[in-house]
């Protein structure tokens, strides 16, 4: 991944992309000094060293049939959003229902978005190549007090999410994140 990024960005563009991300991260951190909401999944009443004995993972999913999927795609087109933005908006709403109400007024939700950088490389890496290239963009931050309550507000949030994603992609954050991750793992593994 690191080599593909190096081939895709000149030294100047790498420096600019990383600098922009760092400045943007500082700005976001200073602007959103609110408490980050932690979704309470369960009370932990055992020593952390025993996590492997008590922890588990699970997935929850829903399936839309062909007609429901087509209705969702049509509605997204009508509203001018991507399906990903619409689903992400719904997820943010669902997460907000888990927030402790006493913290809701002064907390924020941070929503992470992962991205596949393979199409952004020069040359692009085709889908049939067996490899994992995963990157990310800046968190989308939503004050908990601004969580939508109406259908119209949900579509507005989906548009904001989509615009955030487009700005981050245009700023090369997908490739800049790969640079950060590569450096991090190099230092970690030494």
Image (spheres, rainbow, N blue to C red):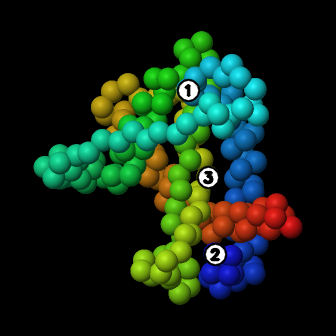
Where residue 5 appears, as percent x and y from the top left, is 65, 77
Task: State the image quarter where residue 86 is shown.
Answer: top left
Could you say whether the residue bearing mark 1 is in a helix, strand or loop?
A: loop
Task: State the image quarter where residue 148 is shown.
Answer: top left
Residue 172 sits above or below residue 45 on the image: below
Q: Is residue 53 left or right of residue 133?
A: right
Residue located 64% across and 34% down the image: 53
The residue wearing badge 2 is 1
> Is label 1 in contact with label 3 (beta carbons under 8 Å)?
no
Measure the C-alpha gap from mark 2 to mark 1.
34 Å
Locate the C terminus and report the quarter of the image it occupies: bottom right
Where residue 146 appears, as percent x and y from the top left, is 50, 28
Earlier along the polypeptide chain: callout 2 or callout 1? 2
Earlier along the polypeptide chain: callout 1 or callout 3? 1
| Res. 138 mark | 3
Look at the image and tell me whether residue 128 can be seen: yes
| Res. 109 mark | none
The residue wearing badge 1 is 41
């Amino acid at each position: 991944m690191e080599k593909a990024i190096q081939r895709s960005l000149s030294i100047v563009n790498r420096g600019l992309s990383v600098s922009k991300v760092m400045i943007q991260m500082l700005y976001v951190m200073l602007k959103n000094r609110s408490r980050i909401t932690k979704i309470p999944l369960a009370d932990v009443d055992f020593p952390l060293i025993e996590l492997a004995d008590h922890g588990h993972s699970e997935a929850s999913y829903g399936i839309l049939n062909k007609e429901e999927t087509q209705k969702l795609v049509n509605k997204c087109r009508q509203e001018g959003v991507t399906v990903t933005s619409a689903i992400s908006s719904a997820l943010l709403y669902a997460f907000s229902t888990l927030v402790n109400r006493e913290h809701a007024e002064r907390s924020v939700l941070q929503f992470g978005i992962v991205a596949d950088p393979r199409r952004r490389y020069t040359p692009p890496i085709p889908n049939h190549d067996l490899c994992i290239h995963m990157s990310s963009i800046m968190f989308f931050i939503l004050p908990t007090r601004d969580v939508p309550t109406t259908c119209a507000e949900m579509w507005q949030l989906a548009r904001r999410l989509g615009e955030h994603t487009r700005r981050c992609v245009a700023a090369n954050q997908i490739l800049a994140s790969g640079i950060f991750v590569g450096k991090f793992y190099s230092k970690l593994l030494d």
